Image (cartoon, rainbow, N blue to C red):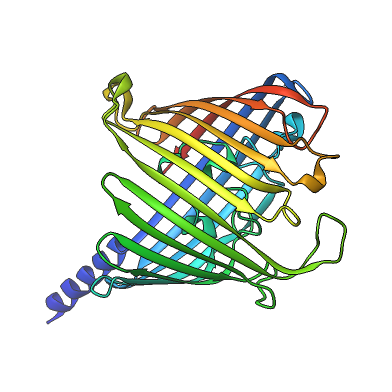
Amino acid sequence: MKKSLLMGVCLLTAASLAAQEVSISVINDSSYVVSGGINEAGTSRTLAVGSFEYQLNDDYLVHIEGQLQRGENGSDDVGDIQAYSNIDEDDFSKLYEIWFQGEYNELGLRFKVGQVDANSEFGFVNHSGEFINSSMGFSPTILFLPTYPIPTLSMNVFLDVNEISHIGLGIYSDESNEFDEVFTIAEWQTQFESATLKLGAWNQTGDIDRLDMTASQDGTNGYYLAVEGGLSLLWLNAASAGWYSQLGYADDSVGEIDLHLGVGLVLYDTFNNQGDRAGIGMTRINTSQYLHDELNKNETSIEIFYRYQLNQYIALKPDIQYIISPGSDKFASDALVVTLRTEFSF
């Protein structure tokens, strides 16, 4: 009896440990403005992320994540609007995400409730994930998106329409986690041949100040489109390759960025090295006509990177960006910026 009880406890303990997953990652960007911009200077910043997941059973998952960021904002030396480093931010340390997810595969239904980074579910492009420019991650025309560094309380539902098409809907609170004013986003995704298409629309409620200095307006909305797919192009002895394109639109009477276009190409497992990546991409934005006295009419960033997987825990990513007409400073010249991103993951 005691032996059976002890064996049962051991089995339950083993099952519990298997259902848990703890991960820690640290990202450091060390950058230098080689020429142009506002100041030819160096900056460094670090983002640390710790997460815990517990699989309650086959259907339910709990996720808790904390983040800490320290360092300087590199865009202060460049004058770019799009943020050439996607970890740039004022120093913070916080409980970043905490959510509960249910997934019913037989129904093609998934839901997620809690404090969620909206970009983890909406607007992202898989093949753009290795670029470090912020606009590669999601279109900057998606105004008010509750993402880094301020995710908010939300309710999200995702449904498989058929074998190749899916729809998602998210309702997000404001930064105070109140639902008096809400951000709503919907995304339809489908596949055709070797490509995936995502079409999204979003809406922000509440009084919003207009850039034309007239009275505020009640809410605003916008749209975005993303297409990505695989390629048989295997340069640098890569195992596979992928491409993507993004297009975003917002009302120029309320958003400083009203149009966005992004394209990119990524090679995976280059030189037959698992984990290595290489990519080239471009992101271009137009600013609101009401801000052309303060901002440049457009800004274009061209990015090239190579990610070298040093070992199981460390990766090095040299990154070069050439930023044409940095948007937030009309007196800033075209900038050449080099960054070494170091990634630690455990």
Q: Where is residue 277 in the image (x, y as percent from the top left)?
A: 38, 30
Q: In which quarter of the image is residue 172?
A: bottom right
Would residue 189 be found to the left or right of residue 117 on screen? Answer: left
Q: Quadrant of residue 105?
A: bottom left
For the residue pair 189 and 96, the one nearer the viewer reads as: 189
The residue located at (77%, 45%) in the rendering is 289
The residue located at (81%, 45%) in the rendering is 291
Q: Indicate the quadrant containing the N terminus: top left, top right, bottom left or bottom right.
A: bottom left
Q: Farthest top residue? A: 35
Q: Quadrant of residue 27?
A: top right
The total of numbered circles placed on residues is: 0
Q: Is residue 62 above or below residue 333?
A: below
Q: Position of residue 113 (x, y in %)?
A: 48, 73
Q: Where is residue 146 in the image (x, y as percent from the top left)?
A: 61, 60
For the residue pair 49 and 147, the one nearer the viewer reads as: 147
* Residue 287 appears in the figure: yes
For the residue pair 163 and 8, the one nearer the viewer reads as: 163
* Residue 82 appears in the figure: no
The residue located at (28%, 59%) in the rendering is 164
The residue located at (86%, 66%) in the rendering is 215
Q: In this view, does 326 lie above or below 51?
A: above
